[in-house]
Image (cartoon, grey):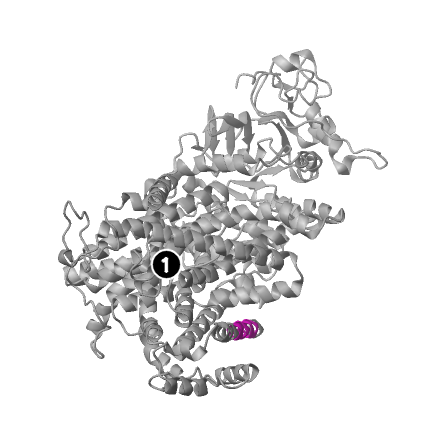
Amino acid sequence: MAAIISNIEAQAPMAKEPGWLGRAGRVMGLVFFTPLGGIGCSLVVAIVLIALFAPAIAPYNPAAISVKERLADPSLAHLLGTDQLGRDLLSRVIMGTRTAMTVALTALSLALVAALPLGLIAGYGPRWLDAVLILVFDSLSSIPMIMLGLAIVALVGPGVSTVIFVIVLYCIPSYARLVRTQTLSLKSRDFIKAEQAMNASTPRILFRHLLPNVIGPLLILACLDISTVITLEAGLSFLGLGVKPQIPSWGNILSDGFAVIRTTPLPVIAGGLPLILATIGFTFFGEAMRDALDPKLSRERH
Amino acid sequence: MMFFLLRRTALAVVILLVVALLLFAMMHLIPGDPTVVALGPRSTPEMREAFRQMMGLDRPMIEQLGLFLGRLAQGDLGQDVWSRRPVLTMILEVFPYTATLALASFAWAIALGILLGCLAVVFHGKWADWLIGLVSVGFVAVPSFVVALYSLLIFAVSLNWLPAIGAGEPGDLLGQFRALILPSFAIGLGWVGYVSRLVRAAMIEAMGEDYVRTLRSFGVAENRIIYRYALKQALLAVLSVIAIGFGGLLTGSVFAEIVFTRPGLGKMTYDAVMSRNFPLVMGTVLFTAGLYVTCMIIADAVTAWLDPRVRSAL
Amino acid sequence: MSAATGAATSISADAVSPVLEMKGLSVCYSGLVPAVAGVDFKVNPGEVVGVIGESGSGKSTLAHAVLGLLPKSANVTGERFVLDGHDMLTAGRDDYAALRGPAAAMVFQNPMTAFSPLHTLGRQLTDLLWRDRHQSAAEKRERIIAVLSQVGLPDPASKLDAYPFQFSGGMLQRVAIAAALLMRPSLLIADEPTTALDVTMEAQILHLMRELRKTSGVAILMISHHLGVIAEICDRVAVMYAGRVVEEGTVREIFANPRHPYTRALFACEPALIESGVSRLPVILGEVPRPGGCGCSFAGRCSLVEERCHCDSPPWVGVADRAEPHFSRCHRSAP
């Protein structure tokens, strides 16, 4: 008898999901009022503002060399001192923020744009293509990311575009896999089956139904990846394999500082601190966002 | 069991084959003269000719591919451009340094990570749990090469407690140990956070299982439940993820080896990139990919060995 | 509990003190929703008492409250709550831990998940004997083997090194009962012990519990939503609805002469009791309301509802002219 009663209860209509925008607003509120999200949001907002207005904030031209003022101690004129070429460190750190954000956002957008169709094809396309793509993704992620980076730099030489290419190549497998899993699970849901039964065209199903459902989790994953990507850019630049030395970047500041580490600790501290703050900020923000949106979304990767 | 391992090995070989194909394709799809790409614009025509012959670049693409894969199958990763020594020999020479560093980093990081994870579960919902969680995320977020630079700055340059350079003289065990501390600290720190979060999540999941309720209903002490039952289940979960994290470990060791001027796989690859020694770079990439898939197989085997359900199914 | 008026609240004669006694016991979650609202209940030594009710009636909460296994958000209050001579209302965490096992042991619904998948049964059963530090491993092993053969597990010695996944659900439920008996408890609580099993297994487990009752004299509190199970082994049954006991009496009496409309509805829904050829399966319309509130909690779904059912709580009264004890909480069964 209890079984009969509970069967009736189980047929309660499913709650209609609210719109994406309305949900996003609520989620941001949820994110901001957690300790993790509060710290993360503040740091992220500060970093984004600094990146946006970098040329206005920076007191000097970050590339201006002044031989007289080499490795100057902090003073009112140079709040963080100068590097071995007499360039103002504060200005370089501020402009470095812009470099880091530009590279990270460009690379992540490209990775998303590339991974979406790949994942949709793998999930919605023929089985053999799925198998081939999965094999390629598995192979790509079996190469440690720094080794992949070094190999690509060895082939095409250093530069911003190389860094972006490495990041894109590193991100594609996990993003595409996520899109594929989501597509596969959606494909078996009733509303997609109904569309298929009504002879809806494949593009219609892909764009009207799969895309909107896939893009949310994908953005969370990308959000969690921002700090990894910033680290990758700074790391490659630190090795002298990333952004060109004259362009201000946190990695380049660290690289220059490493060369004079026995003389003065300042450049290394000045280059490392913003990097730490940025990675912590974006990680906290991403974690809080994931907790708020989808606690079950697991990190797929190292 | 044997069948399972064979199947995993077969998959690993296929993955390595695809990695090799990807590398081969990358080398040949890059626009321009591959010898110039590989050796740099300042290379002499003689060097380019020698390289061309060595890599078999004057033959048709398919034949090159066949040659390339044939050599790989024999364990021949090619020759160093400058010293003409076999790449595999060079890799195996420096690999022990990297392996020691990786194992040392792993050892302390996993031990501390498990401890912190357990503490977080014991204090679940209290401020200590929250603090451990916050610190763990922080550890995960901070780039390992910044940790390497800062610890070099503090403990080697300023305080002069530990060596800043090298891996210690051969035979000098204490010196080798001292040289290991800072780099393994830098690599391991992120892992502490990673493992502690993993252990905490897995144990909290385990503590919600029905069998924990059974144990509780018999008055079995909470500590015994945590350490004898939930931890075992959590460790299984950690094990499978540790293997996947191997790539991150190697990434950390590349930076640590460069910052602390230690010999090793990472330093050698970096030097090879800087000196445009392309066969060596390719060799190390293939080698690390091989290490990665080997770790995966080992982790699967150990998981199967530890989990009676999987063990009996094989 | 204000509504608990009437002749007497106890059913059997108090020759010996009961193993479990509750008076006006309430359990609230998060301080808001009462899952159990003022229950009077007792189990005498050697007695088998059933508690029946649909999902959400509070019967499982009641069972878990006995062992203090409720989540931290649950708050237990009442006039009297005594288990095996110990006052549970003032008991702390350590007191509970000491009583779990020796005073009352529990058998859970799903035997497949009741044991750790990563440890051998021997290991787990030995761990349950943590109290007996003076006993050697060999002695504990002997005890475990003895109790496993008592529950009819063939070749018990060899089963100690096996893992749970190597057993069927019925076998594991036997092991779970054996684990409970290992504690020599005064009260065995069985929370839907046969729900996860198939019918033949169910019969075997019920047979086993009947046997145990005969041989060991343990009191059993049987939680079930299945009338057949209750009828099979219980002496006495309490019908729970929305956190309250609405009818109570000997099994024979209740099954022969159900008085509360809810109990009658339960019988009407029981598939085994439905005559073949009935064109529509009977259902109880509506949902279980939240416990608490004024009036009879079944008023919203009752086919015999009257004006007073909505405003006055019905009294707890003995059903007149019956040979065996029988109490009901309904205005219409009141004199």
Which percent across, then down, holds residue A216? 53, 46
User: Is A231 or C205 nearer to us in this picture?
Assistant: A231
Q: Secondary structure at mark 1?
A: helix
**Relative to residue B61, is residue A76 depicted above or below?**
above
**Relative to residue A110, is residue B176 depicted above or below?**
below
Label 1 Cα neighbours within 10 Å, binned few <14 / some 14-19 / many ≥20? many
Answer whether residue A281 is visible to the viewer in this image: yes
Which percent across, then down, holds residue B265? 34, 73
User: Is C19 or C221 nearer to us in this picture?
Assistant: C221
In the rendered image, the quadrant that contains the C terminus of chain A is bottom left
- Pointer 1 residue: A233
The majority secondary structure of the magenta stretch comes to helix
Q: Residue furthest right?
A: C277
Answer whether residue C146 is visible to the viewer in this image: no
User: Is B44 or C12 nearer to us in this picture?
Assistant: B44
Which three-letter amino acid code belongs to the residue tagged 1?
Glu
**In which quadrant of the rendered view does residue B110 lie?**
bottom left
Range of magenta residues: B5-18
In the rendered image, the quadrant that contains the N terminus of chain A is top right
Q: Residue at x 50, y 44 (%)?
A: A294
**Relative to residue A172, is residue B83 depicted above or below?**
below
Which percent across, then down, holds residue C227? 69, 36
Which percent across, then down, holds residue B238? 43, 58
Q: Could you tell me which chain the residue with mark 1 belongs to?
A: A
Drawn side of residue B133 relative to residue C207, left or right:
left
